[in-house]
Image (tube, grey):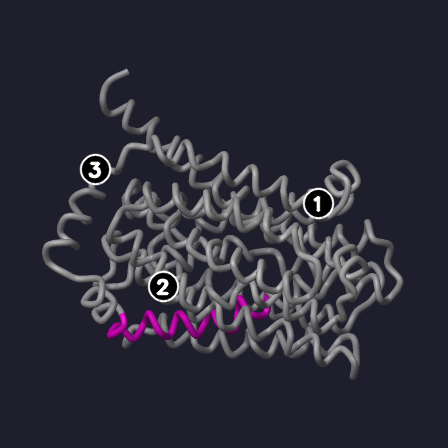
Amino acid sequence: MNNNDHETAYRWYVLTLAALTHTFVAAMPLMCLPVLFQEISNDLGLSLVQIGVVWGLVSLPGVVTSLAGGMIGDRFGVRRTLTIICGLAGITSALRGCSINFLTLSATMFLFGMVRQMIPMNVHKTCGLWFSSRQLGLANGVVSMGMALGFMAGSMLSATFLSPWLGGWRNVLFFYGAICLGLTLPWHFLRPASGELKHSSESRSARSLRQTLVDVMQIKAVWLLGLALFGISGCVQGTLGYLPLYLRGIGWAQTAADGTLAAFHGVSLLCVIPLALWSDRPGARKRVLLITTLMLILGVVLLALVNSVMIWGAVIIAGFARDGFMAIFMTTVIEIKGIGSAYAGTAIGLVMSVMGLGNLLAPPLGNSLAGMSPGWPFLFWALLAAAGLYSLHLALSPES
């Protein structure tokens, strides 16, 4: 094997590791919660609004730590950053299993969210360092497929298989913590990308962290994309946390209710790569992002209006492009003029900080409307996504 073949093989190894990090560190320990909430609430005596608060608290620290994680990755390199993050994610994920009431669960969820929110921008920055623009959409699609796989597996396995097998929800969270800790080793021994040392050296000599942040914050498109994710991701976060409880409330069996989340993530998983390949065609990114957002809005609106078997159709429509959208969205952030792979972490971190605020507020606000009508939360989240769609349109306009 010559040097070029070896480099290509190693590049795909890095991409596989990045995708598995999304699966086992960012996705499964998070998406296990909606299907475990019934068991957790019975054990700890939580109300529906308290569940919404706990679910939203995963995103609260992301308002700060997403930005910090991106800046740290830009300054010190993704290899060292992700080694530490995987270790901390393992510890904080396991701590959630020690909760004894609403306050302790909220505190441990906050700590886990603080660490978890630092993962995606560094994973996507890894893609920017190892892959050229011609392959960047596909690379981001693969790591987003890893996220989709984790979301689907977490929602499908955690309550119906892992909880009975391991002896309850606490042991499920300990189990996920152990997996996170295991992924510190491959990141620790990973060699840096050819451009990573160069970018890191330039960053240290030419710009401080503060200067980098100021430069990124002056780019209008970054803020507009952040506002777009505020609405769109807030809609997804609220819907996913509420859907299993909603379906059980209208008489669905636990297996069927949890299966809708698996269907949401399953159809998303199947569509990531085709959408990423479509977006790599010249001029296609904006079109794909707008169409997929409209699909999400339509599906969430239908959840409020339909019943019985039609709910499955609404879930499939809403989930059709969730992870494909995120892959293309992160590629778009990296490709903003003045960002590139050198400052991708800071830019994605800033966008995800704004997104974290939406993920924090959307679940409890939507859940609070359930007392008026069980379908109203879905309509609220759809309106939130529509506002995000408008911001996305502005961000992708030529004048931005």
Question: Residue 269, can we see it?
Answer: no
The amino acid beneath tag 2 is: Leu
Q: How far apart are marks 3 and 1 (CA)?
A: 39 Å
Q: Earlier in the sequence, mark 2 or mark 1?
A: 2
Near-viewer residue (319 or 243): 243
In screen coordinates, is 213 left or right of 256?
Answer: left
**Placement of 355 over or under 80, stated as above or below:** below
Give the percent coordinates (x, y) of residue 60.
Answer: 51, 68
* Residue sitting at x 53%, y 53%: 323
* Residue sitting at x 39%, y 58%: 284
Quarter occupied by the C terminus: bottom left
Which image quadrant for residue 359? bottom right
Q: Which of marks 3 and 1 is nearer the N terminus?
A: 1
The amino acid beneath tag 3 is: Ser
Instruction: Residue 327: say if magenta.
Output: no
Give the percent coordinates (x, y) of residue 1.
Answer: 28, 15
The secondary element bearing badge 1 is classed as helix
Near-viewer residue (49 or 388): 49
Q: Residue extending furthest right?
A: 251
- For the record, the magenta segment spans 217-236
In screen coordinates, is 397 left or right of 145?
Answer: left
Give the percent coordinates (x, y) of residue 255.
Answer: 82, 49
Q: Disc 3 designates what residue?
A: 194
The amino acid beneath tag 1 is: Ser
Which mark identifies residue 67?
A: 2
Q: Earlier in the sequence, mark 3 or mark 2?
A: 2
Question: Residue 386, can we see it?
Answer: yes
Q: Disc 1 designates what residue?
A: 158
* Residue sitting at x 45%, y 47%: 141
Give the percent coordinates (x, y) of residue 33.
Answer: 67, 55
